[in-house]
Image (cartoon, rainbow, N blue to C red):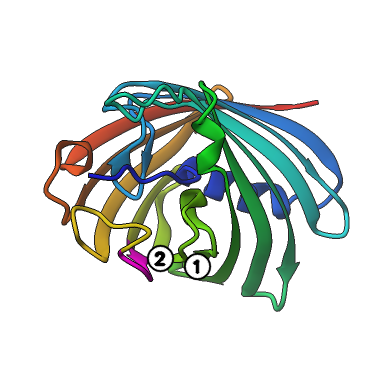
Amino acid sequence: MKSTLKLSALTCASLLVLAQQSQAELSSTVNLTTDYTFNGVSQTQNDPALQASLDYGFDSGWYIGTWASNVDFGDDNDTNLEWDFYAGKFMQLTDKVSLDTGLAYYTYHGDSASDDGNYPEAYAKLGYSSNLGESEANGWYSWDYFGGGGSHYIMMLAHTFEFAEGHNVRFSVDRSTSTNLDNWDWDTKKSYNHYRVEYMTSLEGFDFNIAAENTNLDWGEADERVVFSVARTFSL
């Protein structure tokens, strides 16, 4: 069984928030979560994670940032830290349509072999705002996934709506696909699906998130689960 490594959903969401800021700003977000999952697969052996980011958004829509989290891939893998870097640009194409594109680079630390898993990725996120909420069509592509030389992509559809002031629900479905099973697989599978529904709110400057998610993979780190997180963002 191969572990799946990837930027967390929290980071993807924070990138969009940062890109939408109307003026240049340096900010940092600290997040405590009961499990660091990527597309429904635990990156911490179902244990909690402490995560932090540092981001700078420019007036032009460009942004740069870095993000880190503890990880645990089990077995004899001594990797214990994921540290990512990203840069991109957010564009408001019309009153309702936005586009966020960029590049990310993922690095892993803990022993001398950890950096063998470092890899680059390109992403694009198309957003649509309406009276019914915020819809998204997102894609990620790596041409050297986890340093294995193979390509890998993810497609996601999501929708967020506010059912009461300050209370939001987000539904998402995504599919991860390896283009070469010799380089990457999930228990001999070329791809898998992930489903997630989450409730989001804020109180006294803290952002709270509780999510239920599941995949069609048949192993413990990808079973159905509920994940709770609390985050705080600071303007620097």
Do we see residue 206 in this rendering?
no
Residue shown at the point (62%, 53%) measured from the top left: 16
Answer above or below: position of 124 versus 28. below
> In the picture provided, is 234 more to the left or to the right than 83?
right
Residue shown at the point (81%, 35%) measured from the top left: 26
Is 175 colored magenta in this rendering?
yes
Q: Earlier in the sequence, mark 1 or mark 2?
A: 1
Look at label 2 and name its amino acid: Met
Residue toward you, 86 or 169: 86
Q: Which residue is mark 1?
A: 139
Residue 222 percent coordinates (x, y): 21, 43
SS label for mark 1? strand
> In the picture provided, is 46 more to the left or to the right than 161?
left
Residue toward you, 132 or 101: 101
Residue 79 percent coordinates (x, y): 45, 25
Q: Which residues are magenta?
A: 174-181
Q: Are marks 1 and 2 in contact (CB under 8 Å)?
A: yes
Residue 30 percent coordinates (x, y): 58, 24
Name the quadrant of the C terminus.
top right
Q: Which residue is mark 2?
A: 156
Residue shown at the point (33%, 45%) measured from the top left: 198
Look at label 1 and name its amino acid: Gly
Could you tell me what secondary structure mostly forms the magenta stretch? strand
Q: Residues within 10 Å of mark 2 (few under 14, many from 20)?
A: some
Q: Residues within 10 Å of mark 1 (few under 14, many from 20)?
A: some
Answer above or below: position of 16 versus 125. above
Residue shown at the point (35%, 66%) measured from the top left: 177
Do we see residue 10 in this rendering?
yes
